[in-house]
Image: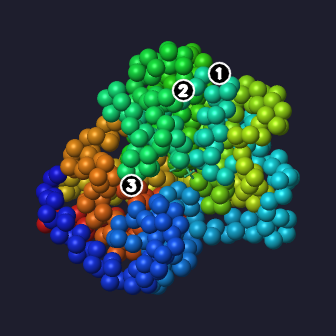
Amino acid sequence: MAGITLGRVKELLGREEERYSNEHPKSKALFEEAGKNFVNGVPMSWMRIWSGGFPLFVAEAEGVYITDVDGQRYLDLCLGDTGGLCGHANPDIVEAVYDQMQNRGTTTMLPTEDCIRVGRELEKRFKLPCWQIVMSASDANRFALKAAREYTGRHLTLAMNATYHGSVDETLCFRFGDMLIHYPGMMGPISRDPSETTRMVEFNDLPALEEVLATEEIACLITEPAMTNVGIIKPEPGYLEGVRELTEKYGTLLLIDETHTMCAGPKGFIGDMDLIPDIFVAGKFIAGGYPGAILGFSREVSSWLSERTPWQNFFGFGGTLSGNAVAIAGILAALEKVLTAENFSRMTSLAEEMEHGIARIIKNYSLDWYVARIGCRVEFRFTPRPPKNGGEALFTEAAYNEVDLIEEGLTGPLEALIHIFCANRGVLLTPIHEMALVGPTTTAGDVHKYVSILEDLVKELTA
Ligand SMILES: Cc1ncc(COP(=O)(O)O)c(C=O)c1O
């Protein structure tokens, strides 16, 4: 990589790790204590993948800032890996959730009047008529794939190579040549051979897609409209329209998962396109950070679901807390007050400034990196051009940076250095990704701060 050596990366990484460890004695001690009662010392394994050897323990989070237990304050560009996109403790969300909890109940297994407004707003934005509310995007995808199998009488799921749709067994694998392989280092062994449940094709490849769909064995194609979990990979012109045409032609349901790409705008990535999927999923921040996800169905699929008795829909769909009153209140507040056109327009223009700032660094220091953006989400990666698909992203980048996918995950020393260098200077990036989100209260000063920290790092790296 232009002017950057592994030796220099490791030297700086050692220095930064020492600083991180020295400056966070309380987090370090709490992490050691937590190790007695939590697997990997954390309540959820993702919290362990931050650089620095131990995660920061949070004292407070407000807007786009986090304060840790050692009293240090950070600009949060991770925003809970999108779960906090509405901003931490957003007053509109807090008011709605608090009011519901305090005055009207949390979970009664009965609907509330708010559902009516939520349903109307979801149909208006995402064009599908009929909805279910669940607890997470993983849940939504799991239920949707199950429904698709029953609806079509077919048993296979088709997904894009190197995709991620949550803790959904059918998609926790990647394609290597003609083989489907589980993500062993990332997700642990899953007993079923993925070839029994799943087929994978590369994103942006319509002929390959048609070949698999033509077998007429695929119940559902699940895809993001732009890939976001191996860097940002955008659809080529006409690709998504082609996907819609081909899935219709071969009787496969099309599930568009906008859990990450909703950052494109108030109607998501496909909202302004002439494209209506059969199933739509979004989660993470849809209830303003409170757990909740949305699962939309076309008229045909929802009619079929509605013709089944509630008992037939009882087993395998939903769960006791799904659709609870607080999640509904959170979704309503997020849609009506936070995920608005006005907020997205502000956030997107700041993200554009961030993208331009990073592009300038890449150019000025002749780095073989690229930067990409969807709405208020910006990410740079370590290859000279954006990859065309997931396979290319996984394997070119691994080869390029001499990273062993299985042994080291995707996190090479350079990535670790970037994250910890930023953290030591008061900026948090999303672990594993070089992903930064602009939230409703992010300022131009915040964007400038992040870009100049990155430039300082690149200066040191290339010195
Ligand atoms: C595209 C996509 N879909 C679904 C999910 C699952 O979301 P959750 O972990 O909230 O269930 C993720 C998580 O990163 C995702 O990236």
Residue nearer the viewer, 288 or 344 = 288
Q: Is residue 164 above or below residue 238?
A: below
Amino acid of disc 3: His
| Percent x, y of residue 362 | 25, 54
Could you tell whether 117 is left or right of 133 in the image? right
Does the beta carbon of the residue at mark 2 sit less than 8 Å from ligand 1?
Answer: no
For the residue labelled by badge 2, is the local secondary structure a helix, a strand or a loop? strand
Asked whether the beta carbons under mark 2 and mark 3 sit within 8 Å of each other, the answer is: no
Q: Residues within 10 Å of mark 2 (few under 14, many from 20)?
A: many
Residue 156 marker: 2
Q: Which disc is residue 153 wearing?
A: 1
Q: How is the image coloured?
A: rainbow
Label located before the other in sequence (2 or 3): 2
Image quadrant holding the C terminus, namely: bottom left
Please say whether residue 267 is visible from this viewpoint.
Answer: no
**Height in image: 250 above or below 388?**
above
**Cα distance in 3D space between marks 2 and 1:** 10 Å
Of mark 3 and mark 1, the one earlier in the sequence is 1
**236 left or right of 290 in image:** left
* Image mark for residue 433: 3
Q: How many marks?
A: 3
User: How far is disc 3 from disc 1 in space, using C-alphas?
Assistant: 38 Å
Amino acid type of the residue that numbered disc 1 sits on in the rendered structure: Gly
Q: Is residue 273 above or below residue 76?
A: above
Kind of residue at badge 2: Leu
**Residue 119 appears at what percent x and percent y?**
77, 44
User: Can residue 39 be seen from the camera position used here?
Assistant: yes
Q: Residues within 10 Å of mark 3 (few under 14, many from 20)?
A: many
Q: Quadrant of residue 180?
A: top left
